[in-house]
Amino acid sequence: MSLPLQGLSAIVTGAGRGLGRAEALELARLGAAVVVNDYGQPGRDGSGEASTAPAEQVAEEIRAAGGRAVAHTGDVSDFEAAGALVALAVGMYGKLDILVNNAGILRDRMVFSMSEDEWDSVIRVHLKGHFNTTHFASAHWRERSKASGGPVYGRVVNTSSEAFLAGSAGQPNYAAAKGGIVGLTTSTASALRKYGVTANAICPRARTRMTEDVFAGFGEPAPGELDPLAPEHVAPLVGYLASPAASRITGQLLVVHGGMVAVLDRPRVAAQFDSAKEAFSYEELTGLLGPYYADRAPDETFAATEVLSLKRA
């Protein structure tokens, strides 16, 4: 029986644990040959000595199940290491077809307490890491398209978070990085559409070492039940977006967790006010915007996500 990703190759970053591991296993199950990338630092804040073990273990798990996989242990926030990662996929499998960006770290702090390094490190791993791999993958697809004279197969699946929508008070660096990833994704989708490449982003809810504090004691399964926040709930959507079946889906942002996928719309205009004269005055804006916001909660955001239920659909 032909598998949907048979004959395709994929890179999954941050694939040594949690979401990335589940995604790498799912892509392999669907037939893809996988490059399993993980820098291997034990601390979720990016601390500790880098290790080859996490990536190697997942690659071996895929091979033991009859799939094809190779480990890569470079740091994707390093531009040259990201280039070497894409080159490895092309060298091993002849081409790259799928890029899943998942690598990230946490260094939580309130904005008034956050250090410059805590800001820079999270932006570097999440946002720059996504850019680095996307840069080299997109250059590969563009060259292939130019050589063939037509579109090629290419899929980018990026990992954002609802933190960028909800504000996440103790994570200004993480929220900013995840918002930047959405912008990077939509820009990439527009730039690569003519080459046949799609780019989408997901906002997953999953119980991993990155979210152990957020979901501690929340929605935990009864004995024998599948955890509604298990990473395995997220992986099938990644497999689908990476497949030929999703060829018409690009530039999209989707929230996913146990038994639910929600397609988020782009922000819409909630209200519009026009100046009575050539330009607004302070007094006119006070008269227009003051009443509009008078009955709104001070922390009401343009995209409330708390309406999304954690119950299975």
Image (cartoon, rainbow, N blue to C red):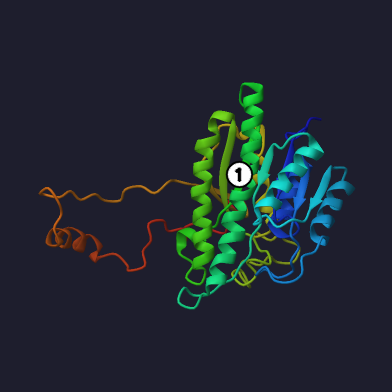
- Between 213 and 81, the residue placed more toward the observer is 81
How far from the left and from the top, in percent, is residue 46? 67, 68
- The answer to whether residue 286 is left or right of residue 182 is left
How far from the left and from the top, in percent, is residue 244? 66, 32
Number of numbered labels in the structure image? 1
**Crowd around label 1: few <14 · some 14–19 · many ≥20 (10 Å):** some
- Compared to 312, does 250 lie above or below? above
Q: Picture quarter containing residue 21?
A: bottom right
- Between 85 and 12, the residue placed more toward the observer is 85
- Compared to 188, does 42 lie above or below? below
Please report the residue visible at 62 percent of the width from the left and 60 percent of the height from the top.
125
Q: Picture quarter containing residue 76?
A: bottom right
- The answer to whether residue 223 is left or right of residue 252 is right
Residue extending furthest toward the top: 149
Q: Pick the quarter of the image with the N terminus.
A: top right
**Label 1: which secondary element:** helix
The amino acid pointed to by label 1 is His
How far from the left and from the top, in percent, is residue 288? 17, 58
Please report the residue visible at 61 percent of the width from the left and 35 percent of the height from the top.
246
- Between 176 and 313, the residue placed more toward the observer is 176
Residue extending furthest toward the front: 80
- Compared to 136, does 210 lie above or below? below
> What residue sits right under mark 1 in the picture?
135
- The answer to whether residue 257 is left or right of residue 70 is left
Please report the residue visible at 57 percent of the width from the left and 59 percent of the height from the top.
310
Q: Is residue 127 visible?
A: yes
Please report the residue visible at 53 percent of the width from the left and 39 percent of the height from the top.
189
Q: Is residue 152 visible?
A: no
How far from the left and from the top, in percent, is residue 175? 50, 62
